[in-house]
Image (spheres, rainbow, N blue to C red):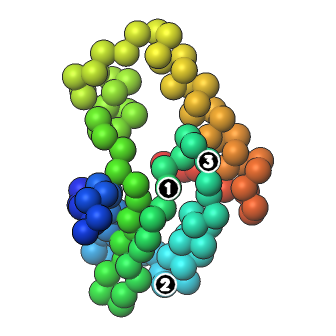
Amino acid sequence: VYRGILPSGQLIAIKRAQQGSLQGGLEFKTEIELLSRVHHKNVVRLLGFCFDRSEQMLVYEYIPNGSLRDSLSGKSGIRLDWTRRLKIALGSGKGLAYLHELADPPIIHRD
C-alpha cells in the first residue's frame, strides 16, 4: 500500500495489485463494483481505481496512524486503553455487520 496526495491536497492510500496476481480483469471489475457501493462510517471508502492491462490499483481514503492491527498490537506506538479497545471492537463489529447484512449483495470480508 502506498500513500499519495491528490492535487486537492487530499491524502490517499493506493493498493496496487501484485505482479503475477491471479486476479483477472473480470474479478477486478466485480471487486470495484462491490466496493463502490459500500458506504459506512466504519469502512474505508474507495475513491477511485486504475484498471489497465499492466496495472490494477485501488485508491482509498487515507486513514492516519497505520493499521488497526498495528494499533492493537502496540507496534504503532499508540497506547489504547480498554475503553478505546472496546469502542474499536464495537465499531468493527458494526462495519462487518453492515457488509454481511446490509450491503447488496452481501460482502464477506476476508482480509
Q: Which mark is residue 40?
A: 3
Please give the residue where the numbered disc 1 appears in the rendered image: 45
On screen, residue 28 versus residue 91, left or right, reads left
Residue 14's x, y, as percent?
Answer: 32, 62
Quadrant that contains the N terminus: bottom left
Residue under the point 63% across and 32% down: 93
User: Tag 1: Cα neighbours inside 10 Å, few (<14), some, or many (≥20)?
Assistant: some
On screen, residue 98 versus residue 33, left or right, reads right
Sequence-first tag of 1 and 2? 2
Q: CA distance from mark 1 to mark 2?
A: 21 Å
Residue under the point 38% across and 79% down: 50
Mark 1: amino acid:
Arg
Along the line of sight, the residue nearer the viewer: 23 or 77: 77
Say above or below: 35 vs 30. above
Along the line of sight, the residue nearer the viewer: 42 or 27: 42
User: Tag 3: Cα neighbours inside 10 Å, few (<14), some, or many (≥20)?
Assistant: some
Residue 47's x, y, as percent?
Answer: 45, 65
Residue 16's x, y, as percent?
Answer: 31, 67
On screen, residue 4 versus residue 69, left or right, reads left
Q: Which mark is residue 25?
A: 2
Mark 2: amino acid:
Gly
Q: Where, by quadrant of the figure, is residue 94 drawn?
A: top right
Label 3 sits on a secondary structure element that is: loop
